[in-house]
Image (cartoon, grey):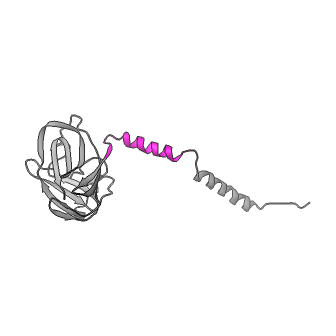
Amino acid sequence: MKNLTIPFFSVFVFAICLGIISCSNPSSKSAESVEEEAVKEVKERASPLKSSSGLVKGKEITVQYGAPSVKGRVIWGDLVPYGEVWRTGANEATNVNFASDVLVEGEMVKAGKYSLFTIPRENEPWTVILNADWDLEHGHFQYNEENDVLRVAVNPTFGSSNQESLTIEVVSEGLEIKWEKAKVLVNIE
């Protein structure tokens, strides 16, 4: 009978391959459980991720944003300082997607995805900004003015009722931003 010996190197390579295979499929987490964890993480955020979509003059628009709450804080001029770029939401930058070319406050904007920023001002029109860098993890901390696609002035209105959580909705006239007592309508055609 022949003596079958397997060289040490072959055994070593086999062991490494077996280890890689077992690590590459760690187990037991199904796609559903991974998805459930992601949904749970989004629900647990202090400023939950929200979205709104709809048609404005037959053009599809979608917006996604982090929705902070007032929580008894002074918002305008304090939490959100006047005269400074605000990410118009919380966490990552708010983004707006236009499925086709649109007019924003009368200015042409090509179809595509943009980040949305505002510069609130006391007793003056606010500046609404669309920026080409739409995938910013830390909102205004990564904002680069050189990539602005649009800057327009919009007059806010202030009501007497309090909007606890920020909402940005696609409405028949465009985008409606409401938080605390402020409401800003960005006209889109």
Q: Is residue 84 visible?
A: no
Name the image quarter holding the C terminus.
bottom left
Instruction: Assess whether residue 149 is covered by the magenta stretch.
Output: no
Question: Looking at the picture, does residue 175 appear above or below residue 106?
Answer: above
Question: Looking at the picture, does residue 48 appear above or below residue 2?
Answer: above
Which of the two residues, 52 or 84, is positioned nearer the viewer here?
52
- Please state if 105 lies on the left or on the right of 16 as rendered: left
Quarter of the figure with residue 143: bottom left
Q: Residue at x 31, y 51 (%)?
A: 92
Q: Residue at x 82, y 60 (%)?
A: 5
Residue placed furthest toward the top: 72
Picture coordinates of residue 86, whole percent (x, y): 21, 51
Name the image quarter holding the N terminus.
bottom right
Q: Is residue 160 visible?
A: yes
- Please state if 15 lies on the left or on the right of 47 as rendered: right
Residue placed furthest toward the left: 123
Instruction: Assess whether residue 35 is covered by the magenta stretch.
Output: yes
- Please state if 26 lies on the left or on the right of 136 as rendered: right
- Residue range (magenta): 27-50
Picture coordinates of residue 23, whole percent (x, y): 59, 51
